[in-house]
Image (spheres, rainbow, N blue to C red):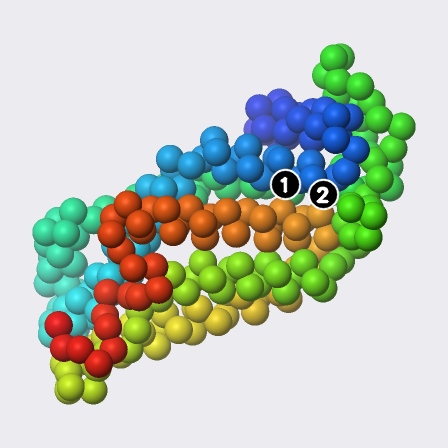
């Protein structure tokens, strides 16, 4: 399995990384180009995942209402949940499968960047037509050191994560909704916790990673957020609002 992973994913990406560095001797720009290329290849899968995640987020208040209405009757809850998915043409697995497909690529890229930014990269896996560089300079644009942790890039990655999550957020229900809005309020509370938890976690992890990996994380998240804007625009969805608008009773 390890040999297959190396031959299909790690080795090709590593050769692209080194080949691009031979053409563009700035590792930060190389990471940007690789990020864009990966995003273009995965664009259809990511779009499908974004649409499914948004649909599931919009249905969360109704799912909470079903749980409250049927209490501990798990069978009835399951039936009503599947009915709700069917009525709204939502496949809960559609948001997970694209992410699972992308995961091996992300892992391979992680090892490529870790190897490429190390003091002594292993060039044994280079193809015969890819020239081995004398050395890979980890300083980008003359002032960003990508071999060491970068607090600035960590904060930028966290900010991009917050922006992306914000588009998927659910606003709390209006007071006029009364008791019926309690379930929506619970969904909103959970959504809000994730909204702030993930960016903070991103910053914390970013502080412990080499700057090159954090740069990729930032660029990848930023491009995904921009793709969400495109997807929402095509679906005529306001990316700054959830399906519940505060101050109005739907």
Q: Quadrant of the C terminus?
A: bottom left
Depicted 62 relative to depicted 41: above or below: below
Q: Quadrant of the N terminus?
A: top right
Residue at the image position 74 percent from the left and 59 percent from the top: 150
* Mark 1 vs 2: CB contact within 8 A: yes
Label 1: how many Cα within 10 Å (few below 14, some 14–19, many 20+): some
User: Which x, y percent locates residue 231?
Assistant: 33, 46
Report whether 99 appears left or right of 157: left
Report whether 176 appears left or right of 142: left
Residue at the image position 55 percent from the left and 37 percent from the top: 36
Residue lying at the far right of the rendered structure: 134
- What's the CA distance linking mark 1 and mark 2? 6 Å
Disc on res. 32: 1
Residue lying at the far top of the rendered structure: 128
User: Which x, y percent locates residue 15?
Assistant: 69, 25
Residue at the image position 24 percent from the left and 73 percent from the top: 245
User: Which x, y percent locates residue 161?
Assistant: 51, 60
Disc on res. 65: none
Instruction: Look at the numbered disc 2 and give the secondary structure of its residue.
Output: helix
Q: Quadrant of residue 125?
A: top right
Q: Is residue 187 visible?
A: yes
Residue at the image position 63 percent from the left and 24 percent from the top: 12
Total count of labels: 2
Report whether 22 appears left or right of 64: right
Read off the residue under disc 2.
28
């Amino acid at each position: 399995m390890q040999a297959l992973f190396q031959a299909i994913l790690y080795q090709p990406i590593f050769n692209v990384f080194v080949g691009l560095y031979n053409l563009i001797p700035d590792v930060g720009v190389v990471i940007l180009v690789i990020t864009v290329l990966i995003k273009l290849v995965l664009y259809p899968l990511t779009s499908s995942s974004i649409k499914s995640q948004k649909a599931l987020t919009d249905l969360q208040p109704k799912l909470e209402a079903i749980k409250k209405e049927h209490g501990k009757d798990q069978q009835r809850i399951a039936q009503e949940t599947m009915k709700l998915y069917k009525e709204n043409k939502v496949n809960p697995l559609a948001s997970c499968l694209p992410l699972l497909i992308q995961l091996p690529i992300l892992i391979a890229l992680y090892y490529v960047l870790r190897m490429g930014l190390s003091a002594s990269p292993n060039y044994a896996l280079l193809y015969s037509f890819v020239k081995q560089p004398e050395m890979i300079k980890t300083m980008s644009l003359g002032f960003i050191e990508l071999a060491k942790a970068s607090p600035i890039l960590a904060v930028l990655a966290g900010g991009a994560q917050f922006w992306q999550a914000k588009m998927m957020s659910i606003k709390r229900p209006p007071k006029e909704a009364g008791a019926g809005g309690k379930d929506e309020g619970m969904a909103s509370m959970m959504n809000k916790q994730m909204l702030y938890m993930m960016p903070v976690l991103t910053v914390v992890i970013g502080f412990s990673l080499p700057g090159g990996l954090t740069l990729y994380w930032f660029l990848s998240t930023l491009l995904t957020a921009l793709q969400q804007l495109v997807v929402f625009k095509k679906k005529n969805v306001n990316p700054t609002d959830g399906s519940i608008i505060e101050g109005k009773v739907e």
